[in-house]
Amino acid sequence: MNSVNTGVLNFSGKYINSKYSNPYTTNSILDNKTTSNSVPDELDRNNIQSLYDYSKDRIKDLHLYYTQFGQMPKWADKNTDLIIKKLGASDVNSSNIEMVLDLIKDKKLPIAALFNVTGHVSKNVEADLDKLFEAYMAGKDVKEVFVPKFKSIDEAANNIEIGDVCQIEGNKNISTKLPDGTIKELFISADTCLELFPPVERFIACQSTTVGDCYLVASLDSINQNPNARHKLLEMFRENPDGTVDVALGGFKFDDGQVIQKEPDNTIVKDISPKIHKEAGKNFASSTSEGIRAIEILHKKYRKEQTDIKVKEQYEYYGRLLDNLERGKHMDTSKVRSYLLRHVEELNKRLKETNSVVIANASSSSDIYTKDELEYFRSFFEAGEEMIDNTVNVYNKNFRISRKEILKRLLELDYKEDNLSKYTRLVLKRYLNELPEEYPDRKCSIAEILPKKILKNIFSNLEEGKFHYNTTRGKENVFRTLGLSETTDGSAQELKDKMFDKSPYKYVFTCSNSKIEPSPAGEVSAQRQHGYVLQPIDIEGERKFLLRNPHNTLNEGIFTYEKLCRHFTTIHCAAIE
C-alpha cells in the first residue's frame, strides 16, 4: 500500500491515514511507545475520588465527542460513574477496563469503546489485551506478536489457533488456519491486515449513532468473533500491486496465479480506503475497525444496487399502467387483490372519474394511484432523482404518519404549485384515504418506493441517516449476503438443535427483539427492534449464550436458553462452510 506519514509508524497505510485523521485516535495501537504502559500501582480502589479522577483523565474528551454525535452531555458523567463502579470491583474485568482506558488515553482506541460498558469485557478483547500489553512490557514488535512468522505451512499449523493469521516465509500475503486445521493463503499483506483489523479494536464494533444497521454490525461481529468463521471476512479483501485494497461480497480466490472474485457478478468496491474516510466523516459507518467499516460500505453499495433494480422495474410497470389507462383499462387484474375483483363495475366507475388505476401495494386504500402520480414518479426517475425503497422499512417508526399529521402537512403544501409539492400532495392524499376519521392519531407506514425528495418533504425532521441504504434489515438474509449459508429456515426444534450443537463454533447467530417492550435482561438489556450478537458457550459443562449489543461489542452478558427465549423473538443462524 502507498506510504503515508502518520507520525507513529513507517509502514504503508492508506487505512491509517483515513482512520487516524480522527482527533481522538491519532496513534497506532501497534506502536509500543505509550505514556501508560501499565496500570498505576498507586490507584486506590477504596478511594472513590481516586477512581473518579483516574476515569475522568482518560475520557476527558467524552463530553465533546458524544455531544458532536447527538449524545446528551449528562451521559458522560453517567458513563464515568458506571466505569468507576466496574473499577471498584477489583477483578479481572476491572483490569481489562483499566487497559482499555489506557489505550484511549494514548489515543489508540476510539472513545466509543467506552459506550455503555454494562457487561463484562468480552473474552476475545481480553485475550488481545493480554497479548498486547505483554508485548508492550517486553518491548516486542506488536505486529509480529499478532502476525507471527513461520518457515513452513506445517510449522504454522502446529503453532497457531483456528482463525489466527500468520506470515509464511516466502509468501507476500498472510495465511490463516481454517476449521479443518489446514493453512490457507489470503489476499492481503500483514500490514494491511493489521490496518483493517487492529489488535483489540478488531473485536470492538460500535454501531453508528445515525445509521440503523444493527442487524449488519451484529452479523459481522458474530462472524468475526467466531474463530471458525473469521476467514470469511478476511477472504473479502484483496490487496492490489498499486497498494489499493478492494472488498467484495463472497470474497476472492486464486485462479491461475491471479486473485479474482469467487462470484464475478457479486458487489465489489475497488480502492475502499477513500470511501471509508468519506462515510466515517459523515458518521455513516461504525466507530470500529476499518475492516468492518469497509464491509458496511460494501453492503451499502449492494443495497443500492438492489434498490436500483426494483426502482427500474417499478418505472417500467408504471409505464405499462399508463399505457393501459390510455386504452381505458383502470385495473391490473394480475396484481389487484382478489376481493376487489368482486366489485369490478363499481370500482371501475370510480377509477374512471378520478383517472386512476388500482395496483397491489401496502394496503387496500393506498392501492389507488392517479395518472398524475404515476407520471410524476417516472419523471423524477428520468431526472435521475435518488429513490428510496421503503418497503424494507415497513416496521420503521420513522416513516409512520397519522391522519392528523397528513392534514397538517397538506395544509402547509396547499398553495405550492411546484412539482415536488404537487407530487407530495398526491402521495399524502392516497394515505389519508387509508386512515379512519374517527382515529386521527392512528398511524400507517409509508412503505413503498418513492423519490427521496418526497419522503424528506413528508418527514422533514428526519436525519440523513434514516434514509441510508443500510438502515433496517427488511427481508434480507444478511448471512447469505455475506457469503454464508443461512439456515434459519426450519422448525424451532431444529434451530434449538443447532444452538446446542456439541461444537459452539459450528454456526453463527444473531437475535432480535421486534415485538415486546424494552425490558432489562441481566447485564445486557433487550431493546425493541434491535439486533444482537449471539454466541454459544459452554460454562462448567452447561450450554450458555453470550449476548453482545452492536452499540458496543466490547461488552457481553451471559444468558441461559430460557432467558433468551423470554426476551428475544427472532434468532438467525448460518452454517460455516
Image: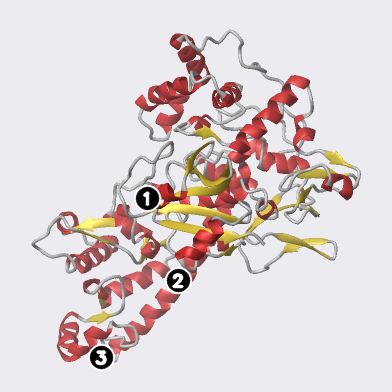
Residue 275 visible (yes or no):
no
- Report helix, strand or loop for mark 1: helix
Q: CA distance from mark 3 to mark 2?
A: 27 Å
Q: Residue at x 63, y 52 (%)?
A: 505
- Quarter of the image for residue 11 reads top right
Q: CA distance from mark 1 to mark 2?
A: 37 Å
The first of marks 1 and 3 along the sequence is 3
* Side of 540 where 263 appears, left or right: right
Give 360 or 18, whichever is nearer the viewer: 360
Name the residue type under label 2: Lys
The first of marks 3 and 2 along the sequence is 2
Which numbered dot is residue 185? none
Question: Circles 3 and 2: CB distance less than 8 Å?
Answer: no
* Side of 436 where 118 appears, left or right: right
Quarter of the image with the C terminus in it? bottom right
Q: Which x, y percent locates residue 152? A: 90, 47
Q: Residue at x 48, y 14 (%)?
A: 51
Q: Which x, y percent locates residue 75? A: 38, 27
Name the residue type under label 3: Gly
Mark 3 = which residue? 328
Determine crowd level at label 2: few under 14, some 14-19, many 20+ residues with C-alpha closer than 10 A: some
* Side of 567 where 177 appears, left or right: right
Mark 1 = which residue? 566
Q: Which x, y percent locates residue 86? A: 48, 23
